Image (spheres, rainbow, N blue to C red):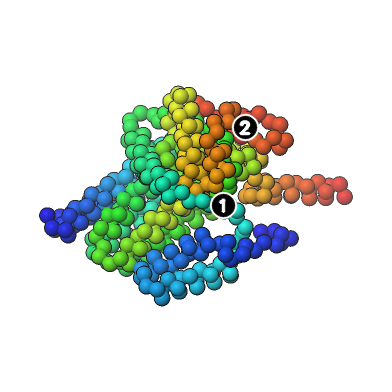
Amino acid sequence: MSPNRTPRRVPLHHQWPALLWLTFVWVMLWGEFSVGNIVAGVLVAVAALLVFPQPPLPLSIRPHPVALGRLVAVFLKDLLASSVQVAALALRPGPPPPNSVIVVPLRTRSEFALMLTSELLSLVPGSLLIEASKTGWCVQLHIINTPDLAAVERARSHVWAQELRVVEALGDADDIARVHQPPPAPPALLPPARSGRGPDATDPS
Amino acid sequence: MSAFAWVVAVTGAFLSVAAVLAAVRIARGPSMPDRAVALDTLVAVFIAGLGAEAAYNRHASTLPVLVVLSLVGVVGSVSVARYATGRESAAPVGESAEPVGEPARSAGELAEPAGGSAEPAGETETADSTSEEDRS
Amino acid sequence: MTWPVVRDVVSSIFLLSGALLALVATVGIVRFDNLFSRMHAATKPQVLGVLLVLVGVAFRMRDPHAIGLIVLVGVFQLFTAPIGAHMLGRQAHRTGLREGDDRIVDESL
């Protein structure tokens, strides 16, 4: 943190997700669901949040239970499928198939949804997060096992499907409307103005 | 030996082979990130192994260790990512014709201006200061 | 079958499949010829393997205290693994580490 930028303090009542999470961890660590333990957990969480102020993070979470359930269920299914896929690739004789690096523009404009989508993408079939940009609203992914261009396009649509599930589960109304629009067609590679180079100008090979 | 003891023995055998394989990748590299990836995996194998032992003896005394391991396992990766990415042993200059720093700087343009990438910023700073010294 | 036996059988299935998955993950880490493929192996089968082993452990445990700790280990594993892989992958990509990575589409920036 640079010294000339004083960290803004977030009022405590806006940090209820962090408070809830810290209390949950405390109770789990003690393994005791008594009232006294939960109260102690809340006190420790408040103390921790006061001593270590969090950077302001705009969290506009609107949980939708049904969509959240679907997000979790599909995620578990995806985790299983991706493990089987990578395991099969690891055991398959012969040289491994070619891979790809792709940039996929996203439709959401919520930082939280961007963060969650990109971290989940590392655990679902085929994709591994390289870069997530909140200025360009896009993710850069490494895709394993892309024998042809159709596989690359499938990976792209997986990203948009994942984004849709995340936003439907936790986004506000504006964002949900946004992700229901058709995905932007050509990848808007960079926030303009910053680079005059073509997309592959830096290919180090 | 009870049936469950056999299960834990086989589990242990799988995990032991896994640990050896991870160690092979740590030894071979070739780059630091390769080693960090393998090290993360080794920590995960340790977590699984300690868990299997706890399951066999039905005790919870090592479980706090698992919590700690699962939290700090990532520190290796993160510190390698911050400080030690790059090719094996910054070999004799001139031997590697590839400009390693060049793609780093341009790829950084994708990142948000404030976040991460302290390295390119540091490079330009030193470059600026030297040129100023030259001028004066 | 009595309940304890059922629990032991379920626990065995989870322990064995988890350990097998962890083994296959390290096979991938040794066999794949480039960093990013190895990271795929280190995130997906690895995380699921640990989660399965943890579920197997949970079925053997008697007190809820242990279950709470096991849940925490699983949650932390799910949080930290992709974040660590992301930081490593981002830095490696910026540094231009791509030996042996045969790509048909490369939208590197």
Q: From this viewpoint, which residue is outermost toward the right?
A: B136
> Which labelled disc corresponds to residue A47?
none
Q: Position of residue B128 (x, y in %)?
A: 78, 47
State the SS at label 2.
loop
Q: Position of residue B82 (x, y in %)?
A: 57, 51
Q: Chain of mark 1?
A: A
Asked whether, in this view, residue A171 is left or right of residue C72, the answer is right
Asked whether, in this view, residue B95 is left or right of residue C81, the answer is right
Residue drawn at x 58%, y 47% is: A111
Q: Nearer the viewer, residue C54 or B133?
A: C54
Q: Disc 2 designates what residue? A: A188
| Quadrant occupied by the N terminus of chain B | bottom left
Query: What amino acid is at disc 2?
Result: Ala
The correct choice, above or below, for B62 with respect to A69 in the image is below
Q: Disc 1 designates what residue? A: A60
Rendering quarter of residue C6: bottom left
Within-10-Å neighbours for mark 1: few <14, some 14–19, many 20+: few
Residue drawn at x 36%, y 36% is: A85
Q: Position of residue B67 (x, y in %)?
A: 40, 62
The correct choice, above or below, for C98 with respect to B129 in the image is above
Within-10-Å neighbours for mark 2: few <14, some 14–19, many 20+: some
